[in-house]
Image (cartoon, coloured by chain):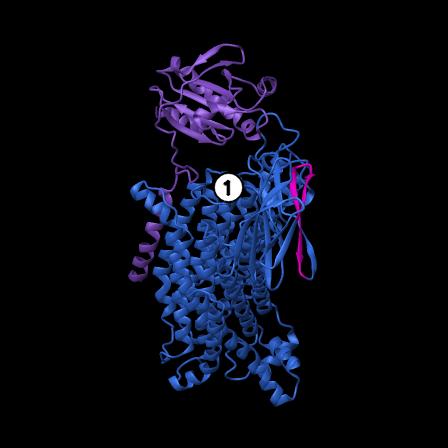
């Protein structure tokens, strides 16, 4: 019953997409209002149908309807409800349905947004978006149909979702956040395609495009961060990033999206770089497709890959088609757009130059990661040799770029738009450069390596500039209006959301950079053999092993080691690293125990337990400042949301009256 | 048409598609196996019906040797795949054998009764044969060619398709 209904919903969605896409392109080409009405209707229908299909699948999962093949694959009566709900994305076919659901939701929202926009742009954009939807609806309806009826006898119980997904609550929010980031990149793509197809790009369209990109970017950032956090809390190796192909796949679109958000500022401000900015918007979506392909095709080996599947070739065909169409579109229409580019006479020392350099670094970074990720495939295709490109390559290549980007984060905002003199630039950079020197000295005193020292220096440099940029306008209000500094800052921040949000994101990036540098440089790790009752000292802590116990749950049994953490001032707490044995896995999966603090984390993971439970081997690590990584990531996310938050009407009116020249244009009122 | 953009675009896009396409059919988890290409260790075991089976007597036939246990859940998953492969290949002269690993005779019989069987299952109660083959855990499946050499070793559940690909090339 659910199988049939689900299939029907998806097929109806497929039909809506097909009709809507054709109507969209026709409506765009003929500037036909009726065609646009049809497209909008079909877009809404597609969104509603995909969401309905997903809800239906959730119903099937929760009611353990094993006649639906996807439920038979990932469902189990022993699995707790919250895990059952999220097992929607624990396996291939369900995750593609979820993709479709997010795309459907995005399409609904976008259809509302384009109501007041240029009809031709709206038609083309909805047409392009529905073409993407068409492909995913096709996958859900055909190759990866989660609603297929279970073959043969309907089982009374199933194996349950992949144990790794059952291990931590972060698994509930990491995938949807990443999906929001990935899937919603389709909207900026469709908008860029619409601008190219129409041959013009207006400020209001560009503004909407940038806001969609920023929204998707915020969730992509959050998703990447939560993935790192999950890896740290669950996998037991004490790290959060391994340059795994699938991690890289999420990082590449993040890089191009970040580059886009910066070049879009140059474009909106100076009317330049239109073609380039749109190329970045389109590349970002293409890279998210590549990322989805990598996780879903079975071509790459990773913790994230689902098993070998047949959707690989179909997916590659789609990627190839979108790639070729995008290149042709850019080549055919870029000149029409850039004809209106205004040439200005900015000098070499200007904010534009800093942004250009920033874009070059981000794009170079993307290519570096892409090359490293694909290199094993290239090498094997050419020589039949199997190699892996590991962390050393990525770290060596990325460290200089990262330090360069951090440094530019300080240089860019201190330089004015247009032209300036070396002397003026120097006067603005003097204080930040002193801070950089202090950062370098601190690094050197702590005996950090050269790249860590460079990171601390660049971070201190960028920090001083960012704080200055955040506080200067507030300071101006303090002197002119006599407000207190916090009041002045809040009043200013409410008016200049985009600017303030951007700098808050920069603060988050600085926190993340320092945390990565510190936690990777000053990490201490040791394997400690423990006997019951015995106390071992490790990096200023004393660890007492109090024994083993076994916890039995319906879907797993866990061996739990109880370790009391003591310091000279008394007991700090109890840590319980575990080893989980799942019914369907050969190898046990560890769950480390972490004592998190602002200064450092104490991280214990259980490596071995003797048969009688009297001795155990625990891998202990101390990682400084690692908690700041998550905090910094949340600051980035918060900054992006702050920037996106719609402004109240009163504030808009007030700021429209007061927008000051030289206010970076960022405080321009919303339309 | 902006030819520079077109050229640059395809310069990036074309190799990307070629590289990704070349990745298909590649198993990212495959590792070079020391046993592959070597002569299969000989054995002499009895099956659950008490019939003796010697590898030496199977020379000239391809042999599929699947190590399994009743307590192993992945083995239960792959079982139908093995039955399907046996149904297809046994008539063409391929000998299929299961080897019961680290299990009791009774439990193994129960497993086969519940899930069906299509070929003899051998008892390796002291796990000597498993040690000779370097079995690290179950399930593991070995394909032995007509000359008695190990053509392929599968670690973990095997699919009927993967087995067919190897058997088809022998």
Q: Position of residue A256 (x, y in %)?
A: 44, 61
Q: Which chain is blue?
A: A
A649 left or right, relative to A213: right
Tell me, what hue is chain B?
Answer: purple
Q: Position of residue B22 (x, y in %)?
A: 35, 42
Of residue A603 and residue A582, the one placed in the foreground of this image is: A603
Label 1 secondary element:
loop
Q: Would you place residue A346 above or below residue A621 in this image?
A: below
Q: Position of residue A269 (x, y in %)?
A: 46, 75
Quadrant for the C terminus of chain A, please. bottom right
Of residue A582 and residue A225, the one placed in the foreground of this image is: A582
Determine which residue is flagged by label 1: A306
Q: Is residue A552 magenta?
A: yes
Residue A87 visible in the displayed image = no
B106 left or right, relative to A139: right
Of residue B33 and residue A177, the one placed in the foreground of this image is: B33
Residue drawn at (49%, 63%) of the image: A517
A378 left or right, relative to A318: left
Give the residues drawn in magenta, as a range: A545-568
Q: Is residue A667 magenta?
A: no
- Find residue A196 and report its image quarter: bottom left
Q: Would you place residue A444 above or below residue A374 in this image?
A: below
């Amino acid at each position: 019953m659910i199988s049939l209904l689900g299939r029907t919903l998806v097929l109806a969605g497929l039909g809506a997409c097909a009709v809507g896409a054709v109507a969209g392109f026709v409506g765009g080409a003929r500037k036909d209002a009726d065609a646009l009405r049809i497209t909008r209707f079909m877009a809404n229908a597609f969104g509603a149908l995909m969401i309905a299909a997903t809800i239906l699948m959730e119903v099937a999962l929760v009611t353990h309807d094993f006649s639906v093949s996807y439920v038979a694959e990932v469902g189990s009566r022993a699995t707790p409800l919250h895990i059952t709900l999220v097992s929607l994305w624990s396996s291939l076919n369900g995750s593609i349905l979820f993709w479709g659901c997010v795309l459907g939701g995005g399409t609904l929202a976008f259809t509302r947004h384009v109501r007041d926009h240029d009809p031709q742009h709206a038609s083309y954009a909805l047409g392009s978006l529905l073409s993407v939807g068409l492909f995913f609806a096709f996958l859900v309806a055909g190759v990866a149909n989660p609603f297929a009826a279970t073959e043969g006898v309907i089982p009374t119980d199933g194996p349950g979702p992949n144990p790794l997904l059952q291990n931590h609550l972060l698994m509930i929010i990491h995938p949807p956040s990443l999906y929001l980031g990935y899937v919603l990149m389709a909207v900026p793509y469709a908008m860029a395609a619409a601008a190219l197809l129409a041959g013009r790009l207006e400020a209001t369209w560009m503004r909407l495009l940038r806001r969609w990109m920023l929204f998707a970017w915020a969730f992509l950032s959050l998703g990447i961060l939560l993935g790192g956090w999950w890896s740290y809390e669950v996998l037991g190796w004490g790290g959060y990033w391994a340059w795994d192909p699938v991690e890289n796949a999420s990082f590449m679109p993040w890089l191009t999206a970040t580059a886009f958000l910066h070049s879009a500022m140059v474009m909106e401000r100076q009317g330049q770089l239109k073609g380039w900015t749109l190329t970045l918007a389109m590349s970002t979506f293409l890279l998210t497709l590549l990322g989805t392909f990598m996780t879903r095709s079975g071509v790459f080996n990773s913790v994230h890959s689902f098993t070998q599947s047949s959707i690989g070739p179909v997916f590659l065909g789609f990627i190839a088609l979108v790639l070729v169409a995008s290149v042709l579109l850019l080549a055919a229409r870029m000149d029409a757009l850039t004809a209106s580019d205004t040439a200005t006479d900015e000098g070499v020392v200007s904010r534009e130059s800093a942004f250009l350099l920033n874009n070059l670094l981000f794009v170079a970074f993307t290519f570096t990661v892409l090359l490293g990720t694909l290199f094993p495939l290239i090498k094997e295709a050419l020589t039949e040799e199997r190699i892996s490109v590991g962390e050393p390559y990525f770290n060596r290549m990325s460290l200089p770029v990262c330090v360069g980007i951090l440094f530019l984060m300080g240089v860019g905002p201190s330089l004015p738009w247009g032209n300036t003199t070396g002397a003026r630039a120097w006067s603005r950079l003097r204080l930040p450069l002193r801070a950089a020197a202090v950062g370098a000295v601190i690094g050197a005193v702590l005996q950090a390596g050269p790249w860590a020292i460079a990171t601390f220096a660049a971070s201190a440099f960028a920090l001083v500039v960012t704080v200055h940029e955040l506080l200067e306008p507030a300071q101006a209000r303090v002197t002119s209006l006599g407000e207190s500094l916090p009041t002045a800052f809040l009043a200013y921040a409410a008016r200049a959301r985009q600017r303030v949000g951007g700098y808050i994101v920069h603060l988050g990036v600085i926190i993340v950079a320092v945390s990565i540098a510190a936690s990777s440089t000053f990490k201490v790790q040791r394997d400690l053999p423990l006997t019951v009752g015995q106390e071992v000292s490790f990096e200023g802590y004393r660890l007492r092993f109090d024994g083993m116990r076994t916890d039995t749950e319906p879907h797993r049994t866990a061996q739990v080691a109880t370790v009391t953490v003591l310091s000279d001032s008394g007991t700090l707490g109890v840590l319980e690293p575990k080893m989980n044995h799942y019914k369907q896995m050969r190898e046990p999966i560890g769950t480390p125990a972490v004592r998190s603090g602002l200064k450092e984390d104490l991280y214990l993971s259980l490596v071995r337990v003797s048969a009688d439970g009297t001795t155990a081997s625990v891998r202990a690590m101390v990682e400084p400042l690692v908690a700041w990584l998550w905090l910094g990531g949340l600051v980035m996310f918060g900054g992006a949301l702050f920037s996106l938050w719609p402004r109240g009407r009163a504030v808009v009116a007030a700021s429209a009256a007061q927008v000051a020249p030289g206010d970076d244009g960022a405080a321009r009122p919303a339309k | 048409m902006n030819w520079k953009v077109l050229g640059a675009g395809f310069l990036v896009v074309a190799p990307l598609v070629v590289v990704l396409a070349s990745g298909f059919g590649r198993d990212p988890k495959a590792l070079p196996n020391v046993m592959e290409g070597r002569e299969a260790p000989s054995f002499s075991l009895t099956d659950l019906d008490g019939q003796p089976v010697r590898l030496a007597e199977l020379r000239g036939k391809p042999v599929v040797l699947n190590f399994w246990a009743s307590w192993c859940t992945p083995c239960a998953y792959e079982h139908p795949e093995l039955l399907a492969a046996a149904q297809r290949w046994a008539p063409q002269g391929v000998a299929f054998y299961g080897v019961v690993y680290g299990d009791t005779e009774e439990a193994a019989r129960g497993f086969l009764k519940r899930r069906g069987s299509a070929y003899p299952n051998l008892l390796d109660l002291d796990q000597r044969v498993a040690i000779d083959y370097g079995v690290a855990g179950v399930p593991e499946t070995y394909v032995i060619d007509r000359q008695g050499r190990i053509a392929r070793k599968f670690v973990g559940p095997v699919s009927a398709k993967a087995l067919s690909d190897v058997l088809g090339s022998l």
